Amino acid sequence: MLLTRQKKNQAAKCSGNRFLISVTVFGSAGPIRFVVNEGQPVAAVVDTALKSYAREGRLPVLGSNLNEFVLYCPVIGTEALKPWETIGLFGVRNFMLCKKPSNKAVVGGDEEPVTKKSSGSWKTWFNKSLNLKVSSH
C-alpha cells in the first residue's frame, strides 16, 4: 500500500502542472475538453484532440493525420501555434483546431496548383455567421 502511494507521488512530481483545456474544432458543435501537462508539445495536444473527437463520434469526420491540422489560440493572435512549442507556454486554456488549407485541386487526375481566393480566417467566418440577415417578405 505504501509503495503504490510513493509511486503515485513520484509520478505526480515528474509530470509537472496539469490543466484542463478546451479545443473547439472548426465546424463542430462544441469544444472537446481534456487534461494536458504544461510541458506537452502542441503536436501531442492536436493528436489527443483528434483521438478524443473520433472516440466521441463527432461530425464532420476529420481523420487522424495530425499534420493536416493546425491549432490556434484566439486570444494570442491569428498565427497558428508551432507543433514543437509547449502548450503551457501560452498561459491560456481555450484553443481552436482547424484543417490546414489545401492549395491544390485535382483536375482530370492531375494535380494543379490553384490560386483560390480565400474567404479569410476562422475569425472572418465567425464574424460573418454573427451577421444574421432577416429577409422581409
Image: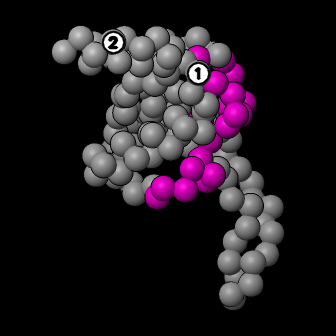
Taking the image as shown, residue 67 lies to the left or right of residue 10, namely right
Residue 75: say if magenta. Answer: yes
Residue 31: say if magenta. Answer: no
Residue 124: name its quadrant. Answer: top right
- Picture coordinates of residue 45, whole percent (x, y): 52, 34
Which residue is at 41% across, 19% downward? 11
- The kind of residue on which mark 2 rests is Gln
Q: Please name the residue that numbered disc 1 is placed on.
A: 39
Image colouring: one colour
Q: Give the number of the mark in front: 2 or 1.
A: 2
Taking the image as shown, residue 120 lies to the left or right of residue 2, namely right
- Picture coordinates of residue 86, whole percent (x, y): 64, 24
Measure the alpha-carbon separation of dots 2 and 1: 23 Å
Q: Which stretch appears magenta? A: 63-88
Residue 125: name its quadrant. Answer: top right
Relative vertical location of residue 57 with respect to residue 23 in this rendering, above or below: below
Q: Residue furthest bottom?
A: 108
- Picture coordinates of residue 126, whole percent (x, y): 52, 33
Tell me the quarter of the image containing the C terminus. Answer: top left
Q: Please name the residue that numbered disc 2 is placed on.
A: 6
Which residue is at 45% across, 31% downward? 23
Residue 70: name its quadrant. Answer: top right
* Residue 69, numbered circle: none
- The kind of residue on which mark 1 rests is Gly
Tell me the quarter of the image containing the N terminus. Answer: top left
Magenta stretch mostly in which secondary structure? loop
